[in-house]
């Protein structure tokens, strides 16, 4: 009997073992188990497990880890250690998934005929193109359209040509992080015209440079129509444009209108020019915080006409600087009509304007607010219907003033971008803004490489060398902008840090909130730019007032986040439903700022909601690929 029981027990163990073997053949190993333990992602997983206490890993964050293989990681770490990354930038950027602009290749442009048509064409370098051409037409239509990070360079284009026409239509439209450079364009040309129509329309972060454009040219027409229309957060530079030109005509129509935070710089524009005619019509119209600088503009010019009509009209805030404008000129006519009638006060500075000029005529008709005139020529200047609101002695914008602006205040505040806490309730229908991530796709760098790349404005020369950023290039602007924001002194009560690796982000969140923290973001972009129905709402940490760490992307070669502590907030998770079918389409994360007393009176939240600093709480969604950290429940 005992022997039979013994055999039964052995058989039971045998069948149990066989069953486990069969089951294991159908069970796949976990993602962590399959991951090569020496890859950046595997290291980030181990780092999370060691630093964060019993909180599930956020897969959306780990997907941003560097895609470098273990061997590539070792190779590029060694190159970074010896300051040799610059020599391998192309392969580094491709394998590490970074934002880099390729070095432009030299085109065989001297072999082209003076007549050229470039349709649905992209990413090229036109060097010494159409130099000395007599007559003819070059047409660029739908050039570099709908591209991510298009890079085009025009050097010595149409130089010393005679009667040669250039037409840029629908050029680089709908692009993302556009970099276009025109160097010595049409310099010394006689006659002919250059037309830019629908140039860089609706682009994100345009970087457009015109250097030595039409210098010493004679009788050439330039036209910029619908230039950078509805563009977002970029810079345009015109250096030595039309300098020492004779009888040049330039028209800027609907330039940068409906744009968002676009800056333009005109340096030595039409300087020492003769009988030039420049018109700025509907320039920066309806823009949001446009910033324009005119340095040494038309200095020493002779018998020219400069006209600014509907300039920065109906824009929000904005800053213009006219430094040494028309200084030492002769019989120059400058007209400002309906200038800077913005609905929120901007800043205008006129320094050395018209100083030492002879026979000038300067007229300001319907000029807006907030100006400052220094060293301004007193003769030959007229002011008609001039309204300078800055003399009131107060810079505050009250809620009643904002409300009186009507629809205008909402022009640059997308519906649903800001809302009140009371809107986060089951059954509420509200608009959702465009929550899509508009940044170029990039990955974090592994800490082993990141720690060997400088991150300081004092090391900008070294950074420019690593990322092949030549002077005044779009990449140089990207580097400087991010460094400037990251090195800015924190606001009162703010703790901030810019992070370029998952490990650095984890360290910062833990330093502020402790080891029991959780990272959250919006599940998808479903419902974006449409009405949504709020479903089940859950307050994080029981809906109590808490502290969080919010991280927002910055534009940089590698994935860089600006992270900062946000005190006195409430964080919520909410199901997002289709208002018609009631079906769940998304799961969102919202943060409500309870203390807004330090916010600007012209902050978009107050323009949208109609109140002021410290008077209301302000809520907003966490957009795609941004995230917020809070203590785990």
Image: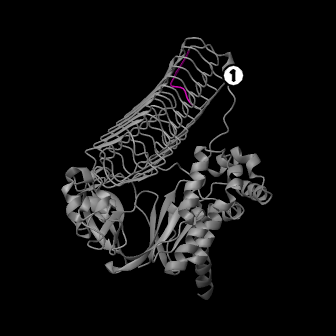
Quarter of the figure that contains the N terminus? bottom right
Q: Decide: is 450 above or below 302.
A: below
Residue at x 60% of width, y 14% of height: 114
What is the crowding at mark 1: few (fewer than 14 residues within 10 Å), some, or many (at least 20)? few
Query: Closer to the camera, 485 or 507?
Result: 485
Magenta range: 116-122
The picture places residue 601, in percent across and down from the top left corner, at: 32, 65
Query: Closer to the camera, 182 or 618?
Result: 182
Q: For this view, does 431 lie left or right of residue 172?
A: left
The picture places residue 139, in percent across and down from the top left corner, at: 51, 20
Circle 1 residue: 108
Query: Closer to the camera, 348 or 574?
Result: 348
Residue at x 52% of width, y 26% of height: 274
* Secondary structure of the residue carrying numbered label 1: loop
Q: Would you say residue 480 is visible in this rendering?
A: yes
Quarter of the figure that contains the C terminus? bottom left
Residue at x 46% of width, y 58% of height: 625
């Amino acid at each position: 009997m005992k022997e039979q029981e013994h055999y039964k027990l052995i058989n039971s163990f045998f069948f149990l073992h066989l069953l486990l073997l069969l089951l294991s053949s159908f069970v796949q190993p976990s993602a962590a188990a399959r991951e090569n333990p020496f890859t950046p992602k595997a290291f980030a997983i181990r780092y999370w497990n060691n630093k964060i206490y019993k909180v599930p890993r956020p897969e959306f964050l780990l997907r941003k880890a560097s895609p470098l293989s273990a061997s590539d990681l070792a190779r590029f770490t060694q190159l970074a250690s010896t300051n040799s990354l610059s020599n391998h930038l192309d392969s580094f950027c491709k394998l590490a998934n970074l934002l880099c602009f390729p070095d432009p290749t030299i085109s065989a442009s001297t072999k082209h005929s003076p007549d050229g048509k470039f349709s649905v064409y992209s990413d090229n370098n036109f060097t010494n193109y159409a130099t000395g051409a007599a007559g003819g037409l070059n047409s660029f239509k739908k050039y570099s359209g709908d591209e991510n990070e298009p890079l085009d360079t025009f050097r010595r284009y149409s130089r010393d040509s005679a009667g040669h026409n250039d037409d840029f239509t629908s050029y680089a439209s709908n692009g993302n992080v556009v970099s276009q450079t025109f160097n010595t364009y049409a310099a010394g040309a006689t006659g002919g015209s250059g037309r830019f129509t629908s140039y860089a329309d609706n682009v994100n972060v345009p970087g457009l440079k015109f250097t030595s454009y039409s210098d010493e040219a004679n009788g050439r027409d330039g036209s910029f129509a619908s230039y950078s229309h509805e563009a977002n957060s970029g810079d345009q530079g015109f250096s030595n444009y039309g300098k020492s030109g004779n009888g040049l005509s330039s028209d800027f129509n609907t330039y940068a209108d409906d744009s968002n935070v676009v800056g333009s710089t005109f340096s030595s524009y039409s300087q020492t020019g003769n009988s030039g005619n420049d018109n700025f019509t509907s320039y920066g119209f309806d823009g949001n915080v446009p910033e324009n600088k005119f340095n040494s503009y038309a200095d020493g010019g002779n018998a020219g006409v400069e006209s600014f009509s509907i300039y920065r009209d109906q824009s929000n805030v904005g800053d213009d600087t006219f430094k040494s404008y028309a200084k030492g000129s002769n019989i120059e006519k400058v007209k400002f009509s309906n200038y800077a009638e913005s609905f929120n006060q901007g800043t205008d500075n006129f320094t050395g304007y018209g100083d030492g000029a002879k026979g000038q005529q300067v007229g300001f008709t319907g000029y807006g607010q907030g100006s400052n005139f220094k060293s301004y020529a007193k003769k030959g200047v007229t002011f008609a219907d001039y309204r300078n609101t800055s003399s009131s002695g107060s810079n505050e914008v009250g809620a009643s003033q904002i409300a009186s602006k009507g629809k205008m205040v909402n022009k640059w505040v997308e519906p649903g971008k800001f809302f009140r806490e009371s809107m986060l309730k089951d059954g509420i229908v509200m608009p959702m803004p465009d929550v899509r991530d508009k940044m170029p796709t990039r990955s974090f760098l592994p800490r082993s490489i990141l720690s060997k790349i400088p991150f300081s404005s004092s090391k900008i020369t070294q950074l420019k060398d690593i990322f092949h950023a030549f002077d005044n290039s779009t990449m140089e602007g990207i580097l400087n902008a991010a460094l400037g924001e990251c090195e800015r002194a924190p606001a009162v009560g703010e703790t901030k840090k810019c992070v370029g690796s998952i490990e650095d982000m984890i360290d910062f969140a833990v330093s502020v909130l402790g080891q029991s923290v959780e990272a959250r973001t919006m599940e998808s972009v479903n419902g974006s730019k449409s009405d949504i129905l709020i479903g089940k709402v859950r307050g994080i940490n029981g809906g109590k007032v808490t502290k969080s760490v919010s991280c927002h992307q910055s534009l940089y070669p590698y994935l860089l986040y600006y992270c900062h502590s946000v005190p006195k907030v409430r964080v919520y998770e909410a199901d997002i439903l289709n208002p018609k079918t009631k079906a769940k389409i998304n799961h969102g994360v919202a943060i409500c700022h309870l203390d807004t007393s330090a916010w600007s009176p012209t902050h978009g939240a107050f323009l949208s909601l109609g109140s002021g600093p410290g008077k209301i709480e302000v809520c907003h969604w966490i957009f795609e690929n941004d995230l917020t950290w809070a203590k785990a429940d």
